[in-house]
Image (tube, rainbow, N blue to C red):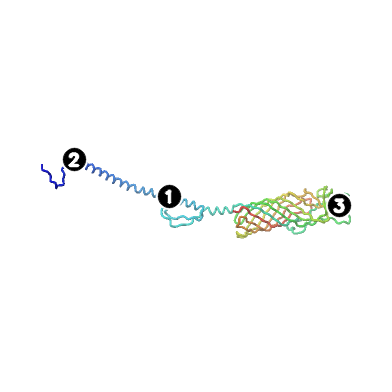
């Protein structure tokens, strides 16, 4: 055998080694081909899955955008000045902003103001008097209640101060009734029906007074005519008109009022008030007169204790923007129920004129 030259750069290989190398090359080629095929297949799979993945991302974005929009709208229902983006595609960047007004927010505020309840205290001070007839007689003079002469005692009774058959003596007359003080205090609740109309109902104590002139008191029994029968009283007053006496009538009343605002001012509202009331006489010290004997006496059985009255007046609202608004204004009241029963001569009614105060305590 010829020895290879050193410059060939070739080495002689064993046939078995050559076979092994060939086999390895074949295996590597096959493996590379498989990898290439797998890669190709994977690329195809990726291409096929690319669109669904994009759709999933788009769906997620759409869901997030819808959630954010719902949250903004929810927030806007509480804040009428909130701003939200307006656009046809929620995935696009919003550039236009408009104020969102909750459709119910304005209505809720309006309904709250219209249907709101308020409460407070009221007081009145003025004058009252006893009238002889209807409301037109309120400013005319009147006289103290006198019993009808239907059961006049006999003239022979020596206990009489005056005898109707006495010759030369003028018949006694009841004292003229002069105006006295009127006082009222209570509480009320008010409901707003519209922008300018409201109603209120309350519970109050009222005292009506009038002044008469009488003589001194006599603590002794006396027969008097009360219009239905002769009765014996243990105390009476003479008709000398030497002193003043205040007839007091104490009532518990339930007034129902209508309030109408006449102007548009919120700071100084001008209101017209009108209403009716029902009252119960709980106490009185008033005196009745018996012209047959010329004495004043007390008889609580002659009163109509349940009284129905009407009232009207005006009020100006001040401090309207504060937490305690105040209404002040004049009013008149007339009890169209007779104060006494039919045993008393003439119809007698209570009348009052006063300055009223209404203080609201629960304005927010």
Q: Which of the two discs, 1 and 3, labels the residue nearer the N terminus? A: 1
Q: Nearer the viewer, mark 3 or mark 2?
A: 2
Taking the image as shown, residue 287 lies to the left or right of residue 104, namely right
Find the residue positioned furthest to the left.
Answer: 1
Residues at marks 1 and 2, CA–CA distance in whole angstroms: 66 Å
Nearest the viewer among 132 and 98 is: 98
Mark 1 surroundings: few (<14), some (14-19) or many (≥20) residues within 10 A: some
Q: Which of marks 1 and 3 is in front?
A: 1
Asked if marks 1 and 3 touch (Cβ < 8 Å), the reply is: no
> Which residue occupies 11% across, 43% down?
3
- Which residue position is annotated with label 1? 64
> Which residue occupies 87% across, 56% down?
169
Residue 161's disc number:
3
Q: Which of marks 1 and 2 is in front?
A: 2
Nearest the viewer among 83 and 342 is: 83
Mark 3 surroundings: few (<14), some (14-19) or many (≥20) residues within 10 A: some
Q: Which SS class for mark 3?
A: loop
Give how far across and how far down residue 221 sits, in percent. Answer: 84, 48
Q: Which of the two discs, 3 and 2, labels the residue nearer the N terminus? A: 2
Taking the image as shown, residue 198 lies to the left or right of residue 295, namely left
Residues at marks 1 and 3, CA–CA distance in whole angstroms: 104 Å
- Which residue position is annotated with label 2? 17
Residue 162's disc number:
none
Asked if marks 3 and 2 touch (Cβ < 8 Å), the reply is: no
Give how far across and how far down residue 180 sits, in percent. Answer: 75, 56
Give how far across and how far down residue 120 sits, in percent. Answer: 64, 52
Q: Which SS class for mark 2?
A: helix
Quadrant in which the N terminus is drawn? top left
Q: Which of the two discs, 1 and 2, labels the residue nearer the N terminus? A: 2
Residues at marks 3 and 2, CA–CA distance in whole angstroms: 167 Å
């Amino acid at each position: 055998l010829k020895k290879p030259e050193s410059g060939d750069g070739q080495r002689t290989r064993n046939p078995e080694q050559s076979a092994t190398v060939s086999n390895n090359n074949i295996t590597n080629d096959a493996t590379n081909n498989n990898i290439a095929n797998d890669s190709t297949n994977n690329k195809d799979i990726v291409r096929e899955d690319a669109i669904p993945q994009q759709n999933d991302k788009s769906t997620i974005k759409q869901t997030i955008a819808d959630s954010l929009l719902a949250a903004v709208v929810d927030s806007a229902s509480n804040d009428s000045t909130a701003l939200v983006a307006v656009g046809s595609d929620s995935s696009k960047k919003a550039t236009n902003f408009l104020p969102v007004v909750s459709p119910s927010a304005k209505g809720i505020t309006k309904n709250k103001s219209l249907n709101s309840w308020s409460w407070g205290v009221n007081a009145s001070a003025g004058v009252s008097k006893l009238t002889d007839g209807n409301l037109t007689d309120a400013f005319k003079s009147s006289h103290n209640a006198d019993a009808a002469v239907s059961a006049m005692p006999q003239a022979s009774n020596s206990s009489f101060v005056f005898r109707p058959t006495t010759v030369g003596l003028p018949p006694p007359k009841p004292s003229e009734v002069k105006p006295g003080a009127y006082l009222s205090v209570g509480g009320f609740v008010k409901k707003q029906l519209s922008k300018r109309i409201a109603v209120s109902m309350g519970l109050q104590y009222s005292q009506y007074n009038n002044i008469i002139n009488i003589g001194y008191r006599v603590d002794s029994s006396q027969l008097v005519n009360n219009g239905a029968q002769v009765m014996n009283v243990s105390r009476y007053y003479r008709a000398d008109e030497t002193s003043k006496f205040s007839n007091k009538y104490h009532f518990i009343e339930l007034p129902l009022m209508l309030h109408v605002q006449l102007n548009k001012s919120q700071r100084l509202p001008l209101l017209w008030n009108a209403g009716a009331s029902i009252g119960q006489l709980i106490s009185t010290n008033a005196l009745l007169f018996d012209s047959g004997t010329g004495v004043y006496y007390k008889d609580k059985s002659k009163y109509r204790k349940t009284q129905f009255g009407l009232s009207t007046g005006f009020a100006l609202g001040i401090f309207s923007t504060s937490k305690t608004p105040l209404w002040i204004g004049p009013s008149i009241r007339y009890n169209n129920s007779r104060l006494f029963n039919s045993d008393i001569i003439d119809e007698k009614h209570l009348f009052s004129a006063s300055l009223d105060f209404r203080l609201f305590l629960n304005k927010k």
